[in-house]
């Protein structure tokens, strides 16, 4: 088993799962881009917005957990690592969809 890959994927899984849980519990709107806060006044339902953000991050973390699991049992997890490339590209689009759904129309 490749312990280095297992540890990296597990730590990333912990990080993104933690980010998802943090988003679920936040009272203020969760941000996506660094340095770009989302104002409470611009969101129609902060709780639903944060829930959608949290789910997005937790679903993303599943790729890391699956890769770590595959590596732990001796399977090649490289195809899941390759699947992370389109997932990383899709994350901003998923976030923009969430933001547009809960953004107040002014």
Image (cartoon, rainbow, N blue to C red):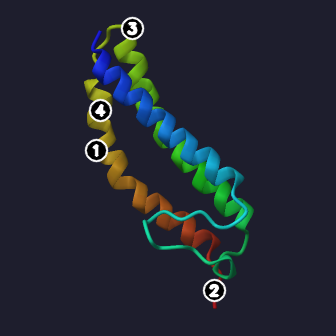
Q: What residue is pinned by disc 3?
A: 73
Q: What residue is pinned by disc 2?
A: 105
Q: Residue at x 31, y 11 (%)?
A: 75
Q: State which tag comes first along the sequence, 1 or 2.
A: 1
Tell me where residue 24 appears, x and y as whole percent: 67, 51
Q: Residue at x 31, y 15 (%)?
A: 3
Q: Is residue 58 above or below residue 3?
A: below
| Res 59 seen here | no
Q: Residues within 10 Å of mark 2 (few under 14, many from 20)?
A: few
Tell me where residue 90 appears, x and y as whole percent: 38, 54
Q: Residues within 10 Å of mark 1 (few under 14, many from 20)?
A: few
Tell me where residue 57 appears, x and y as whole percent: 52, 47
Q: Is residue 56 left or right of residue 12?
A: right
Q: Is residue 56 left or right of residue 8?
A: right
Q: Is residue 54 left or right of residue 10?
A: right
Q: Residue at x 62, y 55 (%)?
A: 52
Q: Residue at x 65, y 63 (%)?
A: 49
| Gap in angstroms between the C-alphas marked 4 and 3 | 16 Å
Q: What residue is pinned by disc 1?
A: 85
Task: Determine which quarter of the picture holds residue 89.
Answer: bottom left
Q: What residue is pinned by disc 4?
A: 81
Q: State which tag comes first along the sequence, 4 or 3.
A: 3
Mark 1, secondary structure of its residue: helix
| Gap in angstroms between the C-alphas marked 1 and 3 | 23 Å
């Amino acid at each position: 088993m490749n312990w280095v890959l297992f540890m990296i994927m597990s730590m990333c899984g912990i990080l993104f799962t933690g980010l998802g849980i943090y988003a679920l519990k936040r009272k203020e709107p969760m941000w996506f881009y660094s340095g770009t806060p989302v104002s409470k006044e611009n969101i129609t339902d902060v709780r639903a917005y944060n829930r959608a953000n949290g789910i997005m991050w937790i679903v993303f973390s599943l790729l890391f957990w699956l890769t770590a699991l595959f590596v732990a049992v001796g399977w090649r997890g490289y195809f899941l690592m390759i699947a992370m490339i389109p997932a990383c590209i899709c994350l901003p689009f998923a976030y923009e969809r969430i933001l547009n759904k809960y953004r107040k129309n002014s």
